[in-house]
């Protein structure tokens, strides 16, 4: 006979199994994408599968992606591509978790990951990012990336004015 | 003097991406940048842009409408004279976008050996201008070209239903 305690334990264990499974799926996806060459404006096998997983698992998927992207072991080109697409998803239910991931990735040690983050934020077009972008501009050592951040800042300030 | 225009991914051409490639000598390009100018049968597709750059937006709109899910658009511009002085050869060959006039501005840089490709990459890095148009602006440019009837709706390759709706295009069959 199951008590509420054993039920909770079973649920936690099932959730952990699901989380592990999603993590493994993402690790496999990121590893396979190392051989892809990404182009602006073109969907790839990687982006299609990534969007499908985020659609399936919602915030849980984004939470699992965060350490994968920020942990320093992911291929920077793949992580950058993932961030670009994170900003393009049209789903309010995961907006906040995706926004947090992009904001966090602005502080990455990889310029390519910071690039993916700023472009993801540009696609999201959420003026809430203005303060974080201003901070990122102040500490950005790469001239071209600073220029991108300034472009995005101008866009978001304009969006805020439009209300 | 006109410019040669080529779509690139902007971050592959950062001048000093030392955090991602600490072994890269100053002024050297990451090998990935060559992927943006990969030729087909030793020819590389470019578009001519007049020196006032008035048609830059129209070219970007035409090329973006040729993509399945247009987003941010990185590009490089380099003076045609610079390339001619370096001995690069051009062939007149119509482009394959949904904008007929833009297609007439298409050229192929031909007879590209691997060595010449490297010369071209270095010329783009040292003598070219690189920039990026953000997704929101790219979508505005496509809308402008649609409003001006520059684009043939049948040839537009955008498959994103959300974007097609935003641009007032019918669903893709």
Image (cartoon, grey):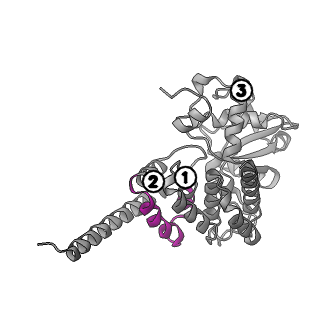
Q: Determine if the magenta segment contains residue A28.
A: no
Question: Does the image show residue B111?
Answer: no
* B170 with respect to B87 (left or right): left
* Residue at 65% from the left image edge and 51% from the top image edge: B9
Q: Quadrant of the N terminus of chain A?
A: bottom left
Q: Secondary structure at mark 3?
A: helix
Dot 3, how many residues are within 10 Å of its Cα: few (below 14), some (14-19), or many (20+)?
Answer: few
* A121 with respect to B161 (left or right): right
Q: Secondary structure at mark 1?
A: helix
Residue A48, position as x, y percentages in the image: 46, 47
Q: Quadrant of residue B97?
A: top right
Front residue (pair B94, B87): B94
Q: CA distance from mark 1 to mark 3?
A: 28 Å
* Residue wearing tag 3: B147
Q: CA distance from mark 3 to mark 2?
A: 34 Å
* Residue wearing tag 2: A50
Chain where mark 2 sits? A
Q: Are marks 2 and 1 in contact (CB under 8 Å)?
A: yes
Residue A112, position as x, y percentages in the image: 62, 62
* Residue wearing tag 1: A85
Residue B21, position as x, y percentages in the image: 63, 68
Q: Quadrant of residue B69?
A: top right
Q: Is residue A24 above or below residue B112?
A: below
* B171 with respect to B32 (left or right): left
Residue B79, position as x, y percentages in the image: 83, 42
Q: Which residues are magenta?
A: A56-81
Q: Residue furthest left?
A: A1
Q: CA distance from mark 2 to mark 1?
A: 8 Å
- Mark 3 or mark 2, which is nearer to you? 3
Question: Does the image show residue A73?
Answer: yes
Q: Secondary structure at mark 2?
A: helix
């Amino acid at each position: 006979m199951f008590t509420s305690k054993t039920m909770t334990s079973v649920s936690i264990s099932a959730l952990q199994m699901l989380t592990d499974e999603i993590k493994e799926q993402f690790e496999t996806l990121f590893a396979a994408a190392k051989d892809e060459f990404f182009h602006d404006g073109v969907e790839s096998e990687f982006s299609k599968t990534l969007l499908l997983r985020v659609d399936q698992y919602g915030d849980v998927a984004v939470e699992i992606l965060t350490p994968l992207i920020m942990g320093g072991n992911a291929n920077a080109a793949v992580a950058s591509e993932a961030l670009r697409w994170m900003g393009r998803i049209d789903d309010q239910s995961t907006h906040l978790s995706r926004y947090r991931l992009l904001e966090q990735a602005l502080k990455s040690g990889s310029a390519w990951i910071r690039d993916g983050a700023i472009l993801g934020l540009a696609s999201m077009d959420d003026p809430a990012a203005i303060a974080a972008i201003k901070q990122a501009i102040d500490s950005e050592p790469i001239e071209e990336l600073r220029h991108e951040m300034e472009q995005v800042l101008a866009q978001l300030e304009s969006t805020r004015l439009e209300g | 003097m006109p410019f040669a225009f080529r779509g690139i991914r902007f971050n592959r051409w950062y001048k000093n991406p030392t955090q991602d490639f600490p072994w890269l000598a100053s002024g050297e390009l990451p090998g990935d940048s060559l992927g943006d100018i990969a030729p087909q049968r030793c020819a590389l597709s470019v578009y001519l842009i007049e020196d006032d750059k008035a048609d830059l937006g129209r070219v970007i709109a035409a090329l973006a409408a040729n993509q399945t899910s247009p987003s941010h658009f990185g590009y490089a511009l380099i003076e045609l004279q610079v390339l001619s002085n370096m001995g690069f050869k051009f062939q007149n060959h119509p482009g394959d976008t949904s904008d007929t006039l833009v297609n007439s501005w298409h050229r192929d840089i031909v007879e590209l050996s691997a060595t010449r490709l490297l010369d071209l990459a270095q010329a783009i890095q040292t003598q070219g201008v690189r920039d990026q148009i953000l997704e929101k602006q790219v979508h505005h440019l496509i809308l402008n070209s649609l409003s001006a009837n520059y684009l043939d709706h049948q040839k537009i390759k955008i498959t994103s239903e959300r974007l097609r709706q935003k641009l007032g295009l019918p669903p893709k069959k």
